[in-house]
Amino acid sequence: MEPTYLQRLSFIKYLFSIALYQSNQPEPLSGVCILSFHDSVELFLLLTHEKFNIFKKSQNFMDYWEIIDNKIGNDKLSQKESMRRLNKARAQLKHHGILPSKLDIESYRVTTLAFFNENCPIIFAINFDDITLIDCINFKRPRESLIKAKQEYEDNLINDALQDTALSFYYLLSDYENNKLIYHSSPFFIGESMTFIGGSLLNFMEVGTDLSSFAGSVIKSIKAIQEVLKILCFGIDYKKYIRFKTIVPSFDLAMDGSPLFHTGSKLELARDDFDFCVSFIVESALKLQEFDFELNIP
């Protein structure tokens, strides 16, 4: 497959993942997912036209099916009637302000995914699940960890996949920050790490005393504030970050830099949750890379 096709398919999947996120919002916010679902399908159909060098005179969304079917022969595009319903829902929302119900949104989520799962192999000879924006991540460690996590998930190594996903995000922020050091100091510096300071300080205090309890609370609060500020400084969506943190295991770094994971192993992980984590890391990486800069130190 041509790299340009894969890149645009990756964008289409990214737009579809945004629609999935929007569809899970409370009403009436969830209604906007109809526009994103529709846009992702139409971009797929436009790319199909380019692939087969098809010229389309009409602007009618439903005309894509007949034109493409005549070109590809025996294999026909599926989900025509379900996409007709989606197109009608999009017109009702955009032109008449009619919001879809939660039940309708669930239906469009299922049928749009089915459209991509069924038609991607036919048109582009690739499974929709195999399309990813991971290769767009410039930093080596987070990219390789995320590729590894994706393979582990496919092999049903859920715990390993979650750990490598958590490490991928950590590497992303760490490598980006380390690439911006000014005389060994980070411009994103928000105070010294409290991980080892906390342990050393409490060792000098009598366990169970009010002072020890107070110091522990202060250290915990400072660590939480540092974490929040760091995420906001990088311009990362904090609400998505919170959801990401509820899925992946938490960890601290040992003195030698190796991760020490705190939570127990998981035997199952929903595909939507894993795809969200991958999309979140990719989105965060693209946001960091959007305004990347070189330091000019005299």
Image: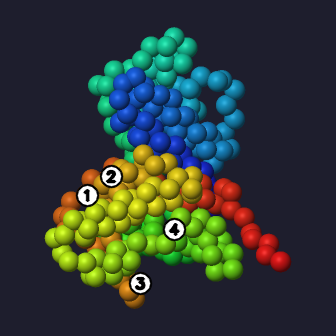
Q: Secondary structure at mark 1?
A: loop
Counting from the top left corner in percent of width and height, residue 259 is at: 35, 78
* Secondary element type, mark 3: loop
Q: Earlier in the sequence, mark 1 or mark 3?
A: 3
Residue type beneath disc 1: Leu
The reply to whether residue 108 is visible in this rendering is no
Give the residue at mark 4: 191
Identify residue type, mark 4.
Answer: Gly
* Residue visible at 66% across and 71% down in the picture: 180
Quadrant occupied by the C terminus = bottom right
Q: Residue at x 51, y 29 (%)?
A: 35
Which is nearer the N-term, disc 2 or disc 3? 3
What's under tag 3, amino acid-wise?
Gly
The crowd level at tag 1 (other Cα within 10 Å; few <14, some 14-19, many 20+) is some
Neighbor class of circle 2 (other Cα within 10 Å; few <14, some 14-19, many 20+) is some
**Labels 2, 3: front one:** 3
| Label number found at residue 257 | 3
Q: Nearer the viewer, mark 4 or mark 2?
A: 4
Q: Residue furthest left?
A: 208
In this picture the colour scheme is rainbow
17 displayed left or right of 205: right
Q: Amino acid at mark 2?
A: Asp
Q: Is residue 56 shown left or right of residue 65?
A: right
* Dot 2 and dot 1 residues touching (CB under 8 Å): yes
Going from N to C along the chain, the mark reached first, 4 or 3, is: 4
Mark 1 or 4 closer to N-term?
4
Among numbered discs 4 and 2, the one appearing first in the sequence:
4
Residue at the (38%, 51%) spot, across then down: 242
Q: CA distance from mark 1 to mark 4?
A: 35 Å
Q: Which of the image's four quarters has the N terminus?
A: bottom right
